[in-house]
Image: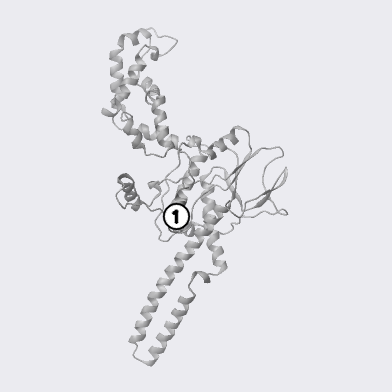
C-alpha cells in the first residue's frame, strides 16, 4: 500500500461524522469496560468495515490510536461542553449533566467536571472533635517553639526581596467563601495570579483572602449570613464516619435531613479552594514567583475565635469533671463515720467547690489566651503555606515593608466595611 504524505485518515469523507454518530449512540456505555475499551474496539471494527474502500484509497490506516486522539473532540462538541460548563458554573452535581448526555461515560464526564471546577491534591479529612468552633488539630499537631509573626513598624519594617522598578500585584479582598461561579478559569483570584504571571510581576501581595463565619448560631442571623456564603458541601472533607450519612442526605433530601459541618472541616474546604485557585490542572503554580501573605481582619478574627472556642471547650470539660467530683465528695461526706473522716471530706469538698468557682471563661489568664492563639496561628500559617505554592505569611494586620523602592505601609482596617 502506498502511504500518502499529506493529510490523515480523517480526510476520508463522512468518517468523522460517522465516528461522532457512533459515540453519541451510547456505544461507549453499552459495551464499555471501566476504560471504555470494548466500546472503542467496537467503533474501530464498525468504521473499518463501513469505510474499508475509502480508507484503503486514502493511503492511511484507521487505528485504535487514531480513535483515541480524536475521541475528545467527538465527545466534547461545543454544545456538550457548554452544557457541562453551565452545570459546573452553577455548582450543580455531575448527575444533572449525565441526565442530558447519558452517552458520555461517567469517568470521562467526571474528569472534565473536575478540570473545569479546578483540581486539588489529596482530599483532606478530619477526625471529629466535639465543641463548636474548635480546630483541635491546631492544639495537637503544632510545635510553636521559635515561631514569630512580626508586625512591621516604620522603624523596623519587614524586608521583602523586591528590586527597584519591579512590578508587584496586590491581591486584596478575595474573601474566599463568598459566592462565585464554579468554573475555576473564571475565578477572579485565579485570573489575577495568571495576570501577574503573564505580565511579569515579580511578586504578589495577598491580603484579606478568607471568609469563614465563626459566630455561634444566633437565630435568624445565621440564615442571613448563609445568603452571602458561596460554600458548597464537600463530603470528602467530612469525617469518614459522617461523610456517608451526609451524602445520603444530599442525594435524597429527606424531610428533616440536615448536613452539619465543623469549623475545622470548613477551614479544610477553604484550603482546598485555595489549592484549586493557585495550582494549574497540570500541578504547576499559577504564579511562579513568591506570594507574600498579610493576614487581614477576617483571618485574625477566625484565628482568635478558634482559640476562644478551644479554651471554652476544655473549660466546660473541666467544669463537668469537677461537678462529678463534687457529687462524689458529697456522697463520701454523707457516708463518713468518724470525725476525722468528716473533716477530711469537708476539706476535700471545699477545695473542689473553690476550684469549680474559679473554672470559668472570664478567669482564664491572659498568658493562656496568648498560648491558644499562637497555637491556632501557627497551624493556620503552616496549612496556608503548604496549600498555596511559593507563599510566605510575613505579617498580620497593618504593617510596614521595605523594598529597594522604599518603605511602604500595608494598611489593614480594623473593621469589615
Name which residue lies at 57% across and 43% down. Answer: 390
The residue pinned by badge 1 equals: 222
Instruction: Determine the image quadrant of residue 121.
Output: top left
Name which residue lies at 52% across and 70% down. Answer: 362
Instruction: For residue 202, say whether it is visible.
Output: yes
Instruction: Determine the image quadrant of residue 287.
Output: top right
Instruction: Tell me the quadrant of the picture where the N terminus can be found.
Output: top left
Which one is nearer the viewer's eye here, 318 or 25?
25
Instruction: Determine the image quadrant of residue 333.
Output: bottom left
Q: Find residue 143 and report its horizontal and vertical position in percent.
A: 53, 58
For this view, does 156 lie left or right of residue 212?
right
For this view, does 210 lie left or right of residue 242?
right
Which one is nearer the viewer's eye here, 387 or 205?
205
For residue 298, above or below residue 308: above
Single out the residue that lies furthest toward the left: 30
For this view, does 400 lie left or right of residue 327?
right
Q: Find residue 108 and report its horizontal and vertical position in percent.
A: 36, 31
- The mark tally for this picture is 1
Q: Find residue 79 and report its horizontal and vertical position in percent.
A: 40, 26
For residue 145, above or below residue 346: above
For residue 191, above or below residue 74: below
Give the colour scheme shown. one colour
Single out the residue that lies furthest toward the bottom: 339
Which one is nearer the viewer's eye here, 238 or 127?
238
State the SS at label 1. Answer: helix
Q: Residues within 10 Å of mark 1 (few under 14, many from 20)?
A: few
Q: Find residue 85 and report its horizontal and vertical position in percent.
A: 42, 33
Instruction: For residue 285, say whether it is visible.
Output: no
Amino acid at each position: 500500500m502506498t502511504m500518502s504524505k499529506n493529510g490523515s485518515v480523517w480526510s476520508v469523507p463522512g468518517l468523522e461524522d460517522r465516528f461522532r454518530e457512533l459515540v453519541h449512540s451510547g456505544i461507549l456505555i453499552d459495551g464499555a469496560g471501566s476504560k471504555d475499551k470494548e466500546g472503542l474496539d467496537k467503533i474501530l471494527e464498525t468504521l473499518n468495515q463501513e469505510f474499508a474502500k475509502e480508507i484503503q484509497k486514502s493511503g492511511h490506516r484507521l487505528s485504535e490510536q487514531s480513535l483515541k486522539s480524536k475521541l475528545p473532540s467527538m465527545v466534547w462538541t461545543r454544545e456538550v461542553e457548554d452544557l457541562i460548563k453551565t452545570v459546573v458554573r452553577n455548582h450543580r452535581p455531575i448527575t444533572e449533566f449525565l441526565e442530558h448526555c447519558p452517552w458520555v461515560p461517567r469517568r470521562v464526564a467526571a474528569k472534565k467536571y473536575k478540570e473545569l471546577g479546578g483540581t486539588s491534591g489529596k482530599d483532606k479529612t478530619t477526625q471529629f472533635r466535639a465543641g463548636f468552633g474548635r480546630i483541635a488539630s491546631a492544639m495537637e499537631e503544632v510545635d510553636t517553639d521559635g515561631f514569630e509573626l512580626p508586625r512591621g513598624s516604620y522603624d523596623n519594617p519587614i524586608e521583602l526581596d523586591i528590586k527597584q522598578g519591579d512590578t508587584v500585584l496586590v491581591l486584596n479582598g478575595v474573601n474566599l467563601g463568598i459566592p462565585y461561579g464554579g468554573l475555576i478559569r473564571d475565578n477572579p483570584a485565579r485570573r489575577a495570579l495568571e495576570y501577574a504571571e503573564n505580565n511579569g510581576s515579580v511578586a504578589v501581595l495577598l491580603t484579606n483572602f478568607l471568609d469563614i463565619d465563626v459566630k455561634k448560631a444566633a437565630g435568624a442571623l445565621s440564615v442571613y449570613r448563609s445568603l452571602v456564603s458561596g460554600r458548597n458541601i464537600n463530603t470528602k472533607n467530612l469525617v469518614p464516619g459522617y461523610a456517608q450519612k451526609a451524602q445520603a442526605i444530599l442525594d435524597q433530601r429527606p424531610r428533616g435531613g440536615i448536613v452539619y459541618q465543623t469549623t475545622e472541616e470548613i477551614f479544610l474546604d477553604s484550603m482546598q479552594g485555595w489549592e484549586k485557585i493557585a495550582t494549574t490542572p497540570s500541578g504547576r503554580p499559577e504564579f511562579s514567583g513568591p506570594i507574600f501573605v498579610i493576614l487581614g481582619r477576617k483571618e485574625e478574627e477566625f484565628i482568635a475565635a478558634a482559640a476562644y472556642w478551644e479554651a471554652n471547650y476544655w473549660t466546660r470539660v473541666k467544669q463537668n469533671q469537677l461537678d462529678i467530683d463534687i457529687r462524689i465528695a458529697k456522697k463520701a461526706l454523707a457516708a463518713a463515720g468518724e470525725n476525722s473522716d468528716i473533716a477530711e471530706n469537708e476539706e476535700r469538698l471545699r477545695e473542689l467547690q473553690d476550684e469549680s468557682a474559679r473554672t470559668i471563661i472570664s478567669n482564664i489568664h491572659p498568658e493562656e489566651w496568648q498560648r491558644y492563639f499562637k497555637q491556632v496561628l501557627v497551624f493556620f500559617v503552616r496549612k496556608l503555606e503548604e496549600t498555596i505554592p511559593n507563599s510566605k505569611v510575613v505579617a498580620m494586620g497593618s504593617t510596614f515593608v521595605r523594598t529597594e523602592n522604599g518603605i511602604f505601609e500595608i494598611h489593614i482596617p480594623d473593621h469589615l466595611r
